Image: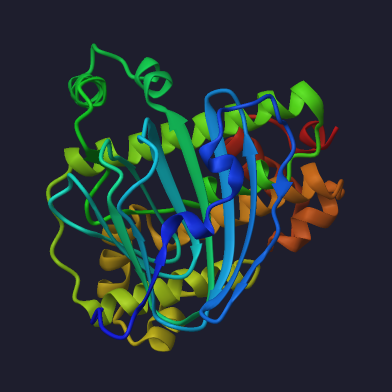
Amino acid sequence: MTRSNFITVDYACVLPPAFHTPPSDQVEFATHAPIRTEWGTVDVKDMVLPEIRVVAFDSQVNQNLHLQQREGWESNTVDTCIFLDGTIESDFAGLTKGMVMHKGMHNFVYKPDVGQDHYLTAQERLNVLHLSVDRLYYCDLLCEKERWSASLKEKLLNRQAVSGAMDNMQMSPRMFGTVHDIMNCTLSGNLRKIVIEAKVLELIAMQLDQLVKRDDTVAVQKINSKDQDAFYALRDFLHQSFTEDHSLKNLSRTFGLNEFKLKKGFKELFGTTVFDYLHDLKMEHARRMLQDAGAYVNEVSGMVGYKNPNHFSTAFKRKFGINPAQYRN
């Protein structure tokens, strides 16, 4: 991204008031007054719990925007960003390399120095879920018996800047499902608080598991930017059409990749095969339809492309360990 012709705005201008305040026992998302400026719009809602803060940003940027922070509160949280839409380039004080975040990516950072710069080009939508977890609470989640965990914990306790994979990580269908559960929890009061906290911890666990697996594998061959764009387009297409029948031949033709490159590159980039990714999308959608919409098993079976409800029930139980009829109840 060429960083010219950017409007510089104080980062604090787009944060909700609760972002700077001590945690409370609030268990509902608070919707803040929308921001309407010459450079775009920002809609923000957040939930502030004792050790966790969840902030959802839904924005449209009409001009190239530089969000800058040089002064402010002392950071004492580990921050996870989940990009549901849009792109941002970021530089953080204390980290030697910047981050580029695209739709479907996630990462975490701890930055004791608050200095940061975010660069956004004009784009139709930016949709980000931001999770802030108290540093010491996060440390208590880490086990000292595992080398990677002990190393991360030591850095956090010593207030050293840390981040996840510098080239960022891809959201899995399960992670998308967990985000959906956070934003659409139907419980209230203390039960809602319990569920939100549990789902945030689930996201942290999946994030760290993904990071460890990346570190334990041999570095994959660099995928050129043109092919990466094709793989991201393919992934987005699967999210929109997972109920349809797909073949490697048709997908290869549609996205200009031969079948070998498609299979190999997709797994390198997203950590799973095309059809395993499709299967996870179907199962997560089925779970949400049973849980949120109260749909019947036969209905859901057809929605996700199963002609035989018994085959769907077997696949669902294999995935989640429970029969879909029991899950619905």
Q: Exactly how many numbered labels are in the figure?
A: 0
Tell me what residue is drawn at x 86 percent, y 32 percent: 329
Q: Quadrant of residue 319?
A: top right
Left or right of 91? Residue 22 is: right
Q: Is residue 132 visible?
A: yes
Tell me what residue is drawn at x 24 percent, y 47 percent: 165
Towards the viewer: 272 or 36: 36
Image position, residue 74 (x, y; %): 35, 35
Towards the viewer: 248 or 145: 145
Q: Quadrant of residue 199?
A: top right
Which part of the image, by quadrant, shows the N terminus? Answer: bottom left
Image position, residue 197 (x, y; %): 59, 28
Tell me what residue is drawn at x 31 percent, y 86 percent: 5
- Colour setup of the view: rainbow
Tell me what residue is drawn at x 36 percent, y 35 percent: 75
Left or right of 110? Residue 103 is: right
Left or right of 85? Residue 141 is: left
Image position, residue 131 (x, y; %): 49, 41
Towards the viewer: 286 or 229: 229
Towards the viewer: 303 or 125: 125
Image position, residue 101 (x, y; %): 35, 62
Which residue sits furthest top? 145
Q: Is residue 246 visible?
A: no
Which residue sits furthest front? 71
Left or right of 172? Residue 150 is: left
Instruction: Please say if 217 is above or below 13.
Output: above
Instruction: Please say if 198 is above or below 307.
Output: above
Instruction: Please say if 67 is above or below 132.
Output: below
